[in-house]
Image (tube, coloured by chain):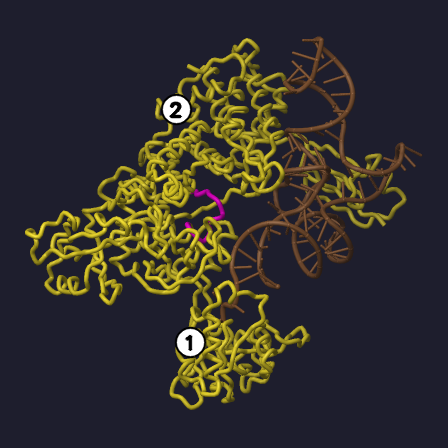
RNA sequence: GCUCGAGUGGUGAAAUUGGCAAACACGCCAGACUUAGGAUCUGGUGCCUAACGGCCUGAGGGUUCGAGUCCCUCCUCGAGCACCA
């Protein structure tokens, strides 16, 4: 049974086999303890209204080739797909049209799915998941409640990034250079009360875990930099004339003798206290100005540093010197203790500042290069440092900290750049946060009476929030009431004052909660007569979760997508564990990939899953495909390639082959329509080696020449190795070499005809299925085992040795015995005419022989 | 500014990791078959030179019998970070 066309009609062939795979559930997969598992994961797409982008099939084809190959190698392969469907575009579409984003999302998903099926990925579609499906986000909300219970979710009123363009707050990770990661709108600092996840508690674990994963270096480095752990010391400086001390964090305690002033952030709590009357006015003014500055202005490097004196003095604990205390906005209140010890001799910023304001600059580290230009920021040997003179920096750091520690003037300390994860968004299209706010009195009364439903989810400290002078406490929704779904509305626009559109739906917002049972009744249908002491009035949390929430655990849901009793069926995770291979874009290096690692470790720590501590042990980023003009594809440039057009014109197999042939998988590469023609030609050539002009299957030779045998076996070997190494471009060129030589030899033999299709199948599955069926095979080539190669056929019987004179190639020498003695080889080599010509009459200085490859005569 | 990564024909790129640079493909040139060719097949195609030959992996230096590959300096492009003390 096969499509049966006469010519290579890719449309007919591809549609035929796609239907076949669907009907026979070829890619459906179950746990099978008799087989080793292999879990291939793609970063699931956001189903945008624009449909599949030409970049999508790059990663998906790569993972598909790997999945099909591993299946052929006998693994039980899981290769699922789903939709990361909460997100901005659907919501903005809803705001514009008034149509519920769920409707629009469903349409987009069906387009994406159809497009992906048309490219022929070996995906088990029965495991399809969608983050906006209540059966899915029920468990996202459940995980939130676990975080809540374990004290990792809290609300905090603090300066957050507010994006007016999106009318929502954003996480640190979503702000890039003062603009929003999505939409590229400017952001500003604003004080708002928000949900925050305590990712900082996992900072060390997230850092250490990176040493045990096989990830691209650059991505590891980005996460390491984002976590930003540094080791150093807190040094306590006595303030002259006050009891208080100023704590300054430094990574360079070895430079303590070079501290000639202190700088506090303008917001530092001690500033007001220590400022002398003479400087009061100027300090106040400076603090006001810097508060008005945006963060972007404050961190603008080009700007010269500014600051003012406080008039107060501190004592350098190392040498007892009196040093000035300044305030300056180059010191951040949010890092370390908001105060620094300034070492202008060995810190660029401090040097700039000291030079501008005429503060003393002392050298305390000797620059080994002898170039004693300050500031010298490297390590060296200590000078002008009393008893520590002569010590190298590295050693001095520990010794000085220990010395100051004896008198409680310092202590060892670490710091992190990582901040807690701002988790709430003022948007409609996200998972509602399953929390109800009730008055603090009601909350405390219930807990005191020991009659309350949320015992299981009681955080050690109530999460509270003050509003209009009343304090409210966060009540977790009863897990039995999950999912908490989005209420219908016709107004999806955020109010812009920090509240989500959900705040405008009173029928959903105001509820009565039975504090004993967890039962909830909308306030507008709550009748007074039911009222007893257990019912309290509450207001639902109106914020929703950020888009990253759903993608934090989706790889677990694929394992048992229909499980109703847990986020993942224990039996399924016991078998499938975590993905063996994960592929997706590099743009998620510090967003999704950091958040998901956090959640995974949390779920692991609380015993919800029993796997390794890292979710993604092997990670790969596919490169970006540029437009034909070598620039990023964009509508405005008009260089966008639509995968539908490509499939229509050349077929899915050609698209798959081409995207893999383009170049190394992880590189940025420009699209080329001419290149498409090349692989398309290759497919036609393959066809014509199997099928004659009348559409009949050709007959093959009984056997092949040694040379063809060698190439066929070498090809089987190389294609397998290249797939394992994700070097698909060279795998394809090897198949081209193989076909070219088969063509020259006048065709395949029976064995190689089948084997060639088996190695082609992961790359171009449709044509492979069709030709495989025409060879008389039943069932799918997907289930055919990967062919073995014969190493003895690959070893060449004769060896070619390059003969060089003074490193220049002069001749080739063919020998049959690789183990021939060196002297014999030299003798043979030197007797070659073209070699003798260059060696004659010259003094032989050296003879080199690299076994089996090269001879080099060095003369005069 | 700092930290990485990358620079190879007209183009996309290969190179067993120190051993014939340019595999494979695109494009181009010539030819064959064709009424026709934007189909197919065959051959050619790094640069200089009439030729012998010489020169070629961003530039310059170094190590080595031998360097695209290792080391140093510089240039260009890309990515990330950007006052984190």
Quarter occupied by the N terminus of chain A? top left
Find residue A668 and report its horizontal and vertical position in percent. 57, 43
Find residue A753 and report its horizontal and vertical position in percent. 53, 20
Would residue A584 be counted in the magenta stretch?
A: yes
The chain letter of the yellow chain reads A
Q: Mark 2 — residue?
A: A21
Report the magenta residues as a range: A581-592
Q: Nearer the viewer, residue A215 or A152?
A: A152
Q: How crowded is mark 1: few (under 14 residues within 10 Å), some or many (20 or more)?
A: some
Find residue A709 and report its horizontal and vertical position in percent. 59, 24
Label 2, secondary structure: give it.
helix
Q: How crowded is mark 2: few (under 14 residues within 10 Å), some or many (20 or more)?
A: some
Left or right of A444 in this view: A170: right
Task: Give the tally of numbered discs.
Answer: 2
Would residue A806 be counted in the magenta stretch?
A: no
Q: Residue at x 32, y 52 (%)?
A: A500
Q: Say if A816 sits above or below A13 in the image.
A: below
The chain letter of the brown chain reads B
């Amino acid at each position: 049974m096969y499509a049966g066309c006469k010519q290579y009609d890719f449309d007919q062939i591809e549609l035929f086999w796609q239907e076949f795979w669907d009907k026979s559930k070829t890619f459906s997969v179950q746990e099978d303890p008799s087989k080793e598992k292999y879990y291939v994961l793609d970063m699931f797409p956001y189903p945008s209204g624009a449909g599949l982008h030409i970049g999508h099939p790059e990663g998906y084809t790569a993972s598909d080739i790997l999945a099909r190959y591993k299946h052929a190698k006998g693994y039980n392969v899981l290769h699922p797909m789903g939709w990361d469907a909460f997100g901005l575009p659907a919501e903005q579409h809803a705001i514009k049209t008034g149509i519920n984003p769920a409707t629009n999302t469903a349409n987009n998903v069906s387009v994406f799915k159809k497009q992906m099926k048309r490219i022929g990925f070996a995906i088990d579609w029965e495991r399809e998941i969608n983050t906006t499906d209540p059966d899915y986000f029920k468990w996202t909300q459940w995980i939130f409640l676990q975080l809540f219970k374990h004290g990792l979710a809290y609300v905090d009123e603090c300066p957050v990034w507010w994006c007016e363009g999106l009318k929502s707050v954003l996480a640190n990770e979503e702000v890039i250079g003062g603009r929003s990661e999505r939409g590229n709108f400017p952001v500003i600092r604003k004080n708002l009360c928000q949900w925050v996840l305590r990712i900082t508690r996992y900072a060390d674990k997230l850092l250490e875990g990176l040493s045990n994963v096989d990830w691209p270096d650059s991505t590891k480095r980005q996460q390491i930099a984002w976590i930003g752990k540094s080791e150093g010391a807190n040094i306590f400086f006595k303030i002259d004339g006050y009891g208080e001390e100023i704590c300054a964090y430094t990574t360079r305690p070895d430079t303590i003798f070079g501290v000639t002033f202190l700088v506090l952030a303008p917001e530092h709590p001690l500033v007001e206290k220590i400022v002398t009357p003479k400087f009061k006015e100027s300090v106040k003014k400076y603090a006001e100005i810097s508060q008005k500055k945006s963060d972007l202005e404050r961190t603008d490097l080009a700007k010269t540093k500014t600051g003012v004196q406080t008039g107060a003095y501190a004592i350098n604990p190392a040498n007892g010197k009196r040093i000035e205390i300044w305030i300056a906005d180059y010191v951040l209140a949010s890092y370390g203790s908001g105060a620094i010890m300034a070492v202008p001799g060995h810190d660029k910023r401090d040097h700039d500042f000291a030079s501008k304001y005429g503060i003393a600059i002392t050298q305390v580290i000797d620059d080994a290069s002898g170039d004693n230009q300050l500031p010298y920021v490297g390590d060296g040997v200590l000078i002008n440092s009393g008893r520590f003179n002569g010590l190298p920096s590295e050693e001095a750091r520990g010794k000085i900290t220990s010395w100051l520690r004896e008198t409680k003037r310092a202590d060892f300390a670490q710091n992190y750049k990582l901040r807690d994860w701002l988790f709430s968004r003022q948007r409609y299209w996200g998972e509602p946060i399953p929390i109800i706010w009730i008055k603090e009195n009601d909350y405390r009364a219930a807990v005191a009476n020991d009659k309350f439903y949320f015992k299981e989810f009681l955080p050690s400290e109530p999460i509270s929030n003050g509003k209009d002078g009343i304090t409210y406490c966060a009540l977790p929704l009863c897990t039995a009431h999950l999912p908490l779904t989005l209420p219908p509305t016709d107004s999806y626009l955020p109010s812009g004052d920090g509240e989500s559109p959900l705040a405008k739906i009173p029928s959903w917002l105001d509820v009565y909660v039975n504090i004993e049972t967890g039962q909830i009744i909308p306030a507008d249908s709550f009748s007074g007569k039911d009222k007893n002491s257990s019912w309290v009035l509450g207001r639902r949390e109106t914020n929703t979760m950020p888009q990253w929430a759903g993608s934090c655990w989706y790889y677990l849901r694929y394992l048992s997508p229909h499980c109703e009793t847990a986020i993942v069926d224990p039996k399924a995770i016991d078998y499938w564990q975590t993905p063996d291979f994960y592929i997706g874009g590099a743009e998620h290096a510090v967003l999704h990939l950091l958040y998901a690692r956090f959640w995974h470790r949390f779920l692991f720590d609380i015993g919800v899953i029993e796997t390794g501590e890292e979710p993604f042990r092997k990670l790969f980023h596919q490169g970006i495909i540029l437009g034909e003009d070598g620039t990023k594809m964009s509508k405005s440039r008009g260089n966008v390639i639509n995968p539908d057009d490509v499939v229509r014109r050349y077929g899915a197999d050609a698209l798959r082959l081409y995207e893999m042939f383009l170049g190394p998988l992880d590189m940025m590469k420009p699209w080329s329509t001419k290149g498409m023609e090349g692989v398309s030609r290759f497919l036609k050539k393959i066809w014509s080696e199997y099928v004659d002009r009348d559409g009949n299957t050709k007959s093959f030779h009984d056997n092949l020449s040694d040379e063809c045998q060698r190439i066929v076996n070498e090809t089987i070997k190389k294609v397998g190795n290249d797939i394992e190494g994700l070097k698909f471009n060279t795998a394809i060129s090897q198949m081209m070499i193989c076909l070219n030589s088969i063509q020259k030899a006048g065709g395949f033999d029976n064995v190689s005809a089948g084997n060639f299709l088996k190695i082609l199948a992961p790359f171009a599955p449709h044509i492979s299925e069709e030709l495989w069926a025409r060879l008389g095979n039943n069932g799918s080539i997907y289930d055919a085992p990967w062919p073995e190669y014969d190493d003895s056929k690959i070893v060449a019987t004769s060896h070619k040795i390059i003969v060089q004179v003074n490193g220049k190639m002069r001749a080739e020498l063919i020998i049959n015995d690789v183990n021939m003695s060196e002297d014999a080889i030299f003798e043979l080599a030197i007797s070659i005419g073209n070699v003798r010509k260059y060696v004659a009459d010259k003094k032989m200085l050296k003879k080199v022989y690299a076994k089996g490859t090269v001879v080099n005569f060095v003369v005069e």
